Amino acid sequence: MEKIKKFKITGNSVKRRLDKYLSDQYNTYSRTYIQKLIQNKYVTVNALHAAPDYKLQYNDLIKARIPDNNFVHNKSSLPDILHEDKYILVINKPAGLNVHPPSDKYSLDENHEVTLSDILYSKYPYSINNSEFNKSRFPGIIHRLDKETSGIIIIAKTPESQFSLSKQFSEHTVKKTYLGIAFGNFSGKNGIIEAQITRNSKMRNRFCVGSNGKESVTEFKVLKQFKGYSYLEIHPVTGRTHQIRVHLSHINHPIAGDKIYSKMETPFYTRRHMLHSYRIKIVHPKTGKPAEYTAKIPADFMNTLKILKNQYA
């Protein structure tokens, strides 16, 4: 059932924007979500529909309806849980699942593509009630994986955990290990890529190496080489968007199956790029002790390795 609430405006809220006022009342939802509610006519002011920037007047009566998100329960379940306690949740995200909906495509329609953010809100609807904690569509998501990248994601369940984990990520003390299959062969067993990454000026959803970008460092180790392909263990020292994919493409060894940063095609089928977030090491935000989590390599990745071993050895 929909959740319906009514609010009567008093002196302290006069002249405030409607969307900002409701964001404070529903502080477990993002302002973007609130704006979508208003734009989709889930909110009335004095029985009339209003714009998100409507300036509230004394004695205005607001009626807001929050759609039931049970469709998330019906369509999707939480990905494999690797660890959960009162402070953090560690999951193994499958390839094909977006962490957040693109902001320009977010929809209240029950037929919109379900994201990890949707699933987390569905499973933990009232776990967070602190507006300072609400910094993203699901505030506990500290870091992200690309839609087609599988593997570990850590979610904070308290404001204190979010602060601790955010600090660890920003200070680059989190140790991340990825596994990837790249085009081409390497002359050495280890390598390091140091190249600044910036947003592509022509295609804003893509990134590239550029002198005006952010300092970015990726280390890698060659685990095994095949004819025309290499199996890599990869350690992103920094955490830029698309970093591993951009860096490997920059040195002409793009990730196999990458439809954005590679012009090469594999002679065998890959439904997505072959990149998996395999292991992560953090300091637990409550205990202060080192914690390490590992995500099982998915079947499609293992099948690609099997093809390489059988046909490209």
Image: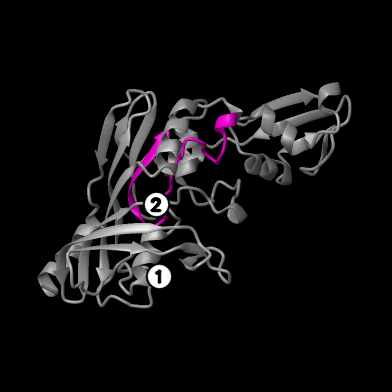
Going by the numbered disc 2, the residue's amino acid type is: Thr
- Which stretch did the figure color magenta? 132-156
> Which image quadrant for residue 102?
bottom right
Give the left or right position of residue 121, taking residue 56 as reference. left
| Coordinates of residue 242 in the picture (x, y in percent) | 42, 59
Lower sequence index among marks 2 and 1: 2
**Is 312 placed above or below 24 here?**
below
Q: Report if residue 191 lies within the magenta region.
A: no
Please give the residue where the numbered disc 2 appears in the rendered image.
238
Going by the numbered disc 1, the residue's amino acid type is: Lys
Give the left or right position of residue 42, taking residue 222 as reference. right
- Disc 2/disc 1 C-alpha distance (Å): 23 Å
- Residue occupying image coordinates x 32% and y 23%: 287
- Residue occupying image coordinates x 36% and y 68%: 258
Nearest to the observer: residue 151 or residue 120 = 151
| Coordinates of residue 312 in the picture (x, y in percent) | 14, 74
Please give the residue where the numbered disc 1 appears in the rendered image.
259
> Which image quadrant for residue 286?
top left
The crowding category of the residue bearing disc 2, from other C-alpha atoms within 10 Å (few below 14, some 14 to 19, many at least 20), is many
| Coordinates of residue 232 in the picture (x, y in percent) | 22, 61
- Residue occupying image coordinates x 34% and y 36%: 90
Secondary structure at numbered mark 2? loop
**Which quadrant holds the N terminus?**
top right
**Is 12 placed above or below 54 here?**
above
- Residue occupying image coordinates x 24% and y 75%: 184
Can the viewer see residue 272 in this picture? Answer: no
Give the left or right position of residue 12, taking residue 32 as reference. right
Q: What coloring was used for the rendering?
A: one colour
